[in-house]
Amino acid sequence: MADLIRSRGGEAIANDSDVSTPEGGSDLIAMTIEHFGRIDLLVNNAGICGSQLFTDATLDDFDRYWRVHVGGPVNTVKAAWPYMAAQRHGKIILTTSVSGLFGLRGQDAAAKCAVVGLMRILEGAEHGILVNTISPVAYTRMHPRRWIPLG
């Protein structure tokens, strides 16, 4: 994607850090600051697909989804926040999903619900930081049975 942006006249860098770890979140933001000198926008879109019914899931299954869906945003926001607060300006967009809003089955849905909670506790206004959550939805071959409401 960075190559495409550059080929069309934009400026972009790529980073393959694992944002589910504090080190990965910090590395991503440090690379951004080093290259661009500041950070104005952070879009958290990390996610993994798949899930099991609660009765079939292990604690490791839950942990994997929480580390990516919640840990990713926490780790990157935590790293970017001091820069944005010092600038008195920044925008943060967290990605949840319809599963997070309506509680569809699975561990990923529980983790995506927590993303909405994270957005609500971030005290950005007093620092000039706007925090929002988006909730895209799609019916794809990756989720053929997932979009069946509970109940």
Image: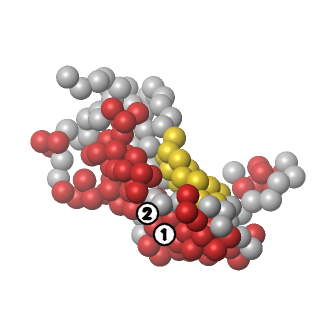
Quadrant in which the C terminus appears: top left
Number of the label disc, if any, that sits on residue 132: none
Q: What residue is drawn where x is 33% and y is 32%?
A: 102
Q: Is residue 37 above or below residue 117?
A: below
Q: What residue is drawn where x is 51% and y is 64%?
A: 77
Image coordinates for residue 115, horizontal then vertical, percent: 40, 50
Q: Is residue 55 left or right of residue 120?
A: left
Q: Secondary structure at mark 2?
A: helix
Question: Residue 35's image quarter?
Answer: bottom right
Image coordinates for residue 92, horizontal then vertical, percent: 57, 55
Q: Residues within 10 Å of mark 2 (few under 14, many from 20)?
A: many
Pointer 2 residue = 74
* Nearer to us in this view, 1 or 100: 100
Pointer 1 residue = 78
Q: Amino acid at mark 1?
A: Lys
Q: Is residue 98 left or right of residue 30?
A: left
Question: Residue 2's image quarter?
Answer: bottom right
Q: Residues within 10 Å of mark 1 (few under 14, many from 20)?
A: some
Q: Is residue 48 visible?
A: no
Q: Amino acid at mark 2?
A: Val
Q: Is residue 63 above or below residue 47?
A: below
Q: What residue is drawn where x is 64% and y is 74%?
A: 86
